Image (cartoon, grey):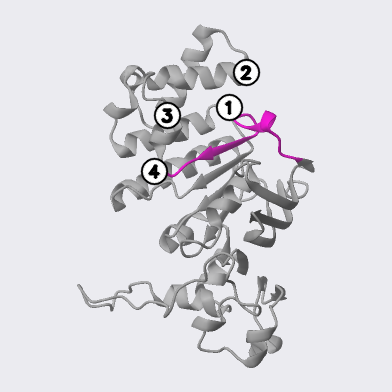
Amino acid sequence: MRPDPQAPGPLLSVRGLSVDFAGVPAVSGLSFDVAPGEVLALVGESGAGKSVTARALLGMAPREATVSGSVLLRGARVTAADWGRRVALVPQDALSALSPVHPVGEQLALAVRSVRGLSRKDARSRALSALAEVGIPASGATAYPHEFSGGMRQRAVIAMAMINRPELVVADEPTTALDPETQDRILAVLGERCTATGASLVLVTHDLGAVRARADRMAVMYAGRLAEYGPVHRVLDRPLAPYTEGLLACLPTAATPRKSRLPVIPGRPPAPGSVPSGCAFTPRCRYATDRCRTERPAPRAVDGREVACHLDHLESL
């Protein structure tokens, strides 16, 4: 999937997005764009704010959350009326998105009828087509979610997300509970459906291999903020933010001995509400200086991406 260079401006424009829970920030000051047909990956450790960001993009932040900043889809704010029509979510837990007491085909038919106003016959036909598009045979339409494997349930959720041809799909760690082979197949199906319909995709994931293979740009998040944001191959081949560098250093390589312990970034991410006043990564960063401990770095343009870091050597790039 690649963005359309002829498309006029971004599909999704995010500026200064912040999400607080009872005054405790979970996401702070995020700004990025998603072009038409583009895949943007949101990556980072657990607790980085990726899932909160994903829900906020769709206007689905929890009621107790306070959301500020600007999230515009084609220049307009996303509302509940856009859910399932212009924007769609592929959740981590397929069972949470599927009713256990209705056949899968019936649920897809209802999803398209509620948005498109089709007749029952036409909605059923569209449901069968949507299932076929993700590799589920017609017989699967009468099955209940518990009768599907984990991979099949995730395919059904992708079919439900795509059935109304949304412009933007947000996939929140959609393969977490699946084995590696099934994970790859599911991501391939999701990518194929977005390519076929022209939808943009925001993919929340821990899998940097999948990011390299399937994303156009990536946003590396740490403690609710952007650490690095730019084209995938530029960021992965030459990481500039120390946090990005640390994440990549933890990946196995062809030279990594089997059954050996992989390296980890020392320490732990800060808990919400206890983020240091300077750079949040300072306690774990081997390059940290006194400036890092007292001054929070703002993202700056460096080598074709944005990097939130005080490192002096970035000035010369």
Q: Are marks 3 and 2 in contact (CB under 8 Å)?
A: no
Per the model, the C-alpha gap separating discs 3 and 2 is: 20 Å
Tell me the kind of residue under disc 1: Asn
Q: Amino acid at mark 2?
A: Arg
Vertical side of 38 occupied by 192: above or below: above
Disc 3 packing (10 Å; few <14; some 14–19; many ≥20): many
In the image, residue 222 above or below residue 162: below
Expressed as whole percent of the image width and height from the top left, the position of residue 271 reads 52, 67
Disc 4 and disc 3: Cα gap in Å?
Answer: 17 Å
> Going by the picture, which residue comes out furthest to the front?
22
Task: Check disc 4 and report the residue beneath it.
Answer: 186
Magenta residues span 77-92
Up/down of 68 relative to 279, above or below: above
Circle 3 is placed at which residue position? 98
Mark toward the viewer: 3 or 1: 3
Task: Give yes or no for contact between labels 2 and 1 (Cβ–Cβ under 8 Å).
Answer: yes
Sequence-first tag of 3 and 2? 3
Please report the residue visible at 55 percent of the width from the left and 89 percent of the height from the top: 287
Element at label 3 = loop
**Residue 116 image label:** 2
- Earlier residue among tags 1 and 4: 1
Disc 4 from disc 2: Cα separation: 26 Å
Of the image marks 4 and 2, the number of the one nearer the N terminus: 2
Mark 1, residue position = 164
Q: Residue at x 70, y 82 (%)?
A: 295
Residue nearer the viewer, 90 or 194: 90
Q: For residue 78: magenta?
A: yes
**Disc 3 from disc 1: Cα separation:** 17 Å
- Mark 2 Cα-neighbour bin, 10 Å: few <14, some 14–19, many ≥20: few
